[in-house]
Image (cartoon, rainbow, N blue to C red):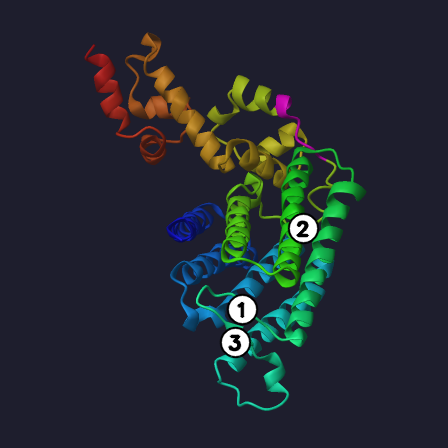
Amino acid sequence: MTIIFNLYFSIVVLAIIVLVDIFIKFKNPPALKFFFLLLPTSIALIALINATSAIKFVFFLAPLKSSMAVAVLNIFSILYFPKFKKWVLIVSTCMLTFTVFLMLVNKDIIPRNSFVDRFRIISVDENLNIKITPLVRFIRFSFIIFMAITIGYFWYVIYKKLNLNNIYYEKIRKWTSFIFILGCSVFLMNIAISFIIPSEIWVNSLTIYILFYILLLVLKRPGFLNHSAIKIAFGQKFNQDAIIDEMNFIAVFFKNRYYTNPEASLGNLSKILKANAGELSAFVNSEYQMTFNELVNKNRIAYFLEVVQDKAYQNFTIDALAKIVGFSSRQHLQKPFKKFHGGSPSDIIDSINSH
């Protein structure tokens, strides 16, 4: 059991890492960020309860697992299928209400009667193996089947029905396929646990697999999801006419040193590339894992380091050098220089002149 405990503890650590990653990187609307944060939070608490075999907290497992399902459904709905938003909200409310009701019943907060007793957990052993009534099993399976059908439908639409030709769609297709595998795993896992007499190792192994899988899925989400201010609902982002030509972007931005343009901006470059500004922003975030302004400043600093070593610019002031690489003044150079290189421009120049 030491191995099981260590695995659950490692899940808690990974969940914290994922939480920090989302807090730092995720720039999407608050509702979407909330559901992304809900996943690792629920997983961390589930892992803690299982790791400590805390029987007094076992009744919290159902609401926590329900929260995970709600998070997955709402992430899909917000990102890709806004027309299902109300339906998903209704189902999410039902799932959470039912599992909270179960918790209150089994914590004896709701008074006992013949109806309430149908929702009581029959027994819980020291390894947190739970025996439930047929009614609870039926309702739980109804929710699981709904989840499987919904995720299956989403996967079918994304992977089979649509045939969009751009880099974002391809990444979403792969990510969605992994989520579909997750949904199948959860469905089969619940069938196995319910209809096969499970051993402690069997149940824990399946649970650990699912929790690790979800965390890695969130951690490895497509990069452009972190920054895109536009909903990625089909018919909007994926169907936009202007698709970024990567080679054209490289030619303009890097080879022609567009970043040295003092007026460099997302809107200006999108006009040059004849592309949509939102599409361009998502492209930069996906390919370079940073915002457009960060990419501009990073390359300006790299160019500044080239310029200061060129003898032709040896007698230029820092203010003049800053303007050559695209900054409006020395003051605007300082902060990006510290972020992407460290130290100060004058230190670098002094170091070069001393040789």
Secondary element at tag 1: strand
Residue type at mark 2: give it.
Answer: Cys
Secondary element at tag 2: helix
Determine which residue is flagged by label 2. Answer: 184
- What is the C-alpha distance between the residues marked 1 and 2? 22 Å
- Outermost residue toward the left? 354
Residue 245 falls inside the magenta stretch = yes
Verify CB contact (< 8 Å) between mark 3 and mark 2: no
Q: Residue at x 52, y 86 (%)?
A: 110
Q: Earlier in the sequence, mark 3 or mark 2?
A: 3
Residue type at mark 3: give it.
Answer: Met
Q: Earlier in the sequence, mark 1 or mark 2?
A: 1
Residue 307 % position (x, y): 37, 16
Answer left or right for 248 relative to 347: right
Of circles 1 and 2, which is in front? Answer: 1
Determine which residue is flagged by label 1. Answer: 130
Determine which residue is flagged by label 3. Answer: 103
Q: Residue at x 54, y 37 (%)?
A: 285
Residue 119, above or below 33 = below
Q: Magenta segment, which residues?
A: 242-248
- Residue 326 visible, this angle: no
Residue 237 % position (x, y): 68, 44
Answer left or right for 169 relative to 43: right
**Front residue (pair 262, 11):** 11
Residue type at mark 1: give it.
Answer: Ile
